[in-house]
Amino acid sequence: MTAKALMIQGTASDVGKSMICTAFCRIFSDEGYKVVPFKSQNMALNSFVTIDGGEIGRAQGVQAEAARVIATTDMNPILLKPKQDMVSEVIVHGKHLLDMTATSYRNDFVQEAMPIVEKSVRKLQDEYEIIVLEGAGSPAEINLKDRDIANMRMAHLADAAVILVADIDRGGVFASIIGTLTLLDEDERKRVKGIIINKFRGMRELLDDGIEWLEKATGIPVLAVVPYIEINIEAEDSLALSSLRFKKPKQQEFAIDVAMIRLPRISNFTDVDPFFDEPEVGVRLVRSISELGTPDLLILPGTKNTVDDLQWLRDEGFVEEIQKLRAKGIRIFGICGGFQMLGNQLLDPEAVEGDGRNSEGLGLLPVTTVFNTSKKTEQMTGNLLSNGQELTGFEIHLGQTEIQDSNTKAFLKLHDGRLDGAVTSDGRVIGTYFHGIFNNREFTREIVNVLRIEKGLPAISDAVKTDAQRREDAYQLLAEHVKKHTDMEKVYEIMNLTSSENI
């Protein structure tokens, strides 16, 4: 069996490729097809840990769940995680390979990567009925095309029909489509079988003349005009982060103020997402000390380079301000790199984080971190030591953190017997390696209620939906939204399928 292939490419980054792929994964799954997502090479700040401990792009983990299949590293065989300026960690089939400069990767590694990604494509084609491929950035970057293994080379390899997605919300949609098609080679243009105009706001009929002109000019049908929709599905990259519509607290609107520091090398920033769903909670992304204020909860997120981002905090004046917040009794929560920063010392004897320098932490938790080259990637389950509540999440980190004070307790006891994290005796500073901690919705609601009670507000008693229920609702809503505005018969036609056909 060789799977039919549909590839979603974009006129630029952050036009909505990942969301459209997620929608099609669920649409095809709803039709009864065995469907799988694929992205050959992904550069992502947020990653997903597979059941066997492999690290892939967050989007492919989400898409696999939407497709109702178990995520594997074949769905994203190569993952690049920016670590320093022009340096990325190269992850192959879920495991750390090496750190590499952009020049070295382009000149030395790309050709080695092709057999890796081809093997994954062939395996998925043999095991599934439909493969939904996602491109990266734009297929028309002429300075990169000879080494681009994420776009048209994958379309040729999988014999995929390509749908080009453009973002009308950013403006210049017709120029971006025409420009992209013009810069493609003839054989590449022939693969583009449809166009999706995404993130549309306004009256659909006002676009008709433009669509008529576009179809005449290109000979390619516009398969969908998808209206802008806000759906709580995890984002993946830094562009998505910069465009997030954070709920900025105003006294008359939000009772609780949650602030997260926007570290330069922030990773897994979606850890904060569940707070968006909590009633009367405002969420802020803080870039400077002038924006910090006095939040009810301060979150230090993960980072791809703890030492460099810690130095940035020091240079920008955050260290003193965070310490002042602690003195005021403000609750502070550090995750992964944020946890490491909260400690007393960060030691780097093997130069894992850069030049091997040791660093003084914020001194808010009596812990010391020693970086090493052994990377821990694992799905996790554990129990709060405070009350026994079971929590699930995942860890992705280099280094080992140890509590140095016998009066300080760990945060969690993991089911493999290890202890995780640290909590101050007053419970107001917490650090953990547990990514996805706030996706445990009962736990997050308890945090919100503690903050409310401390401010003299009543606790929220509404029932809490589980994270799995929320994700399922979001996938179904997205699929129905995209399907409603897409000519699905044409989609099946360009794939040589029908909605009722069995492969």
Image: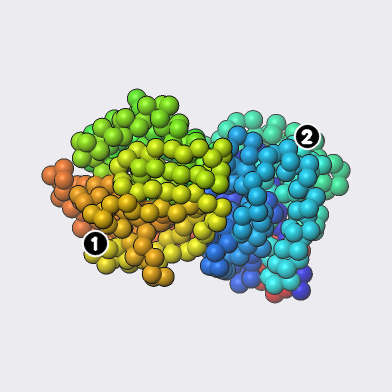
Q: CA distance from mark 2 to mark 1?
A: 55 Å
Going by the numbered disc 2, the residue's amino acid type is Asn
Q: Is residue 217 visible?
A: no
Residue closest to the eye, 24 or 274: 274
Task: Residue at 23%, 64% (x, y): give it.
Answer: 387
- Whether residue 196 sits left or right of residue 315 in the image: it is right
Q: Is residue 107 visible?
A: yes
Q: Earlier in the sequence, mark 2 or mark 1?
A: 2
Task: Residue at 39%, 60% (x, y): give it.
Answer: 467
Q: Nearer the viewer, mark 2 or mark 1?
A: 1
Q: Position of residue 383 (x, y in %)?
A: 32, 66
- Whether residue 357 sits left or right of residue 283 in the image: it is right
Q: Position of residue 166 (x, y in %)?
A: 64, 40
What's the mark number on residue 143? 2
Q: Are marks 2 and 1 in contact (CB under 8 Å)?
A: no
What's the mark number on residue 386? 1
Q: Position of residue 40 (x, y in %)?
A: 69, 54
Task: Residue at 76%, 48% (x, y): give it.
Answer: 110
| Quarter where residue 86 is shown | top right
